């Protein structure tokens, strides 16, 4: 179960700088309904957690969603997934409510390795060191499946939340 908060997508670029592929020159009017719902949908968080996604991650969600849509256009395996930034934000909230299992803690650390350097959130040391790990985390095949399933579930919740928001605004 989850609750949500609205993501601000008004500051997204209409065209990414120096497109090298057709997907990178994607504009808002070229998006599918599902992509628009994802782009403008709420940020999903664990329902009963009293914690919000950290502000530094929250600020990245609109651009991360845009990039996830671009990646989904370029690689079918990414098409229906939420961004890694959203996944780590959700797990961050969940981890403050209760300890993560070993597998989900490794997934959380793996996502940290992916997200933190991308946005310059860790400086001066390698991400594994900053997390207190002796080496980078490598996911096993089941963890990869679990992460993809989780990101797919999260994407559906965002798109469903956008539908609910739209129907509430339409009925007013």
Image (cartoon, helix red, strand yellow):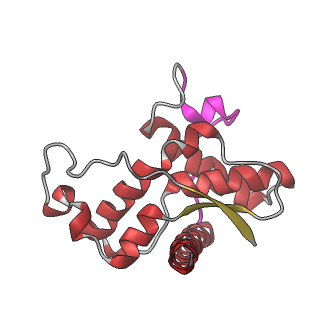
Rendered view: 106 above or below 4: above
Magenta part, dominant SS? loop
Could you say which is closer to the camera, residue 106 or residue 15?
A: 15
Q: Residue at x 54, y 28 (%)?
A: 122
Q: Does the segment drawn in magenta span residue 129?
A: yes
Label count reads: 0
Q: Residue at x 21, y 69 (%)?
A: 30
Region of the chain picked out in magenta, as a range: 125-141
Q: Residue at x 45, y 36 (%)?
A: 119
Direction top: furthest residue: 124
Q: Residue at x 54, y 80 (%)?
A: 167
Rendered view: 127 above or below 2: above
Position of the C terminus by quadrant: bottom right
On the image, the x and y values in percent for residue 12 come to 34, 49
Direction right: furthest residue: 98
Q: Can residue 136 be seen from the camera position used here?
A: no
Quarter-wise, where is residue 133 in the image?
top right
On the image, the x and y values in percent for residue 81 come to 47, 69
């Amino acid at each position: 179960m989850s609750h949500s908060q609205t993501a601000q997508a008004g500051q997204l670029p209409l065209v990414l700088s120096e497109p090298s592929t057709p997907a990178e020159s994607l504009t808002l009017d070229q998006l599918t309904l599902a992509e628009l719902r994802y782009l403008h949908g709420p940020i999903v968080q664990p329902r009963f957690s009293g914690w919000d996604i950290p502000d530094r991650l929250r600020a990245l969600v609109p651009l991360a969603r845009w990039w996830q849509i671009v990646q989904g256009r370029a690689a079918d395996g990414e098409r229906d997934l939420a961004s890694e930034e959203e996944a780590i934000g959700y797990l961050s909230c969940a981890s403050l409510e209760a300890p993560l299992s070993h597998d989900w803690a490794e997934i959380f650390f793996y996502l940290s390795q992916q997200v933190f350097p991308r946005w310059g959130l860790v400086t001066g040391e390698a991400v594994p060191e900053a997390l207190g790990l002796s080496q980078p985390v490598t996911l096993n095949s089941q963890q990869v499946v679990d992460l993809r399933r989780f990101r797919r579930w999260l994407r559906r919740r965002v798109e469903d939340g956008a539908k609910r928001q739209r129907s509430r605004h339409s009925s007013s």
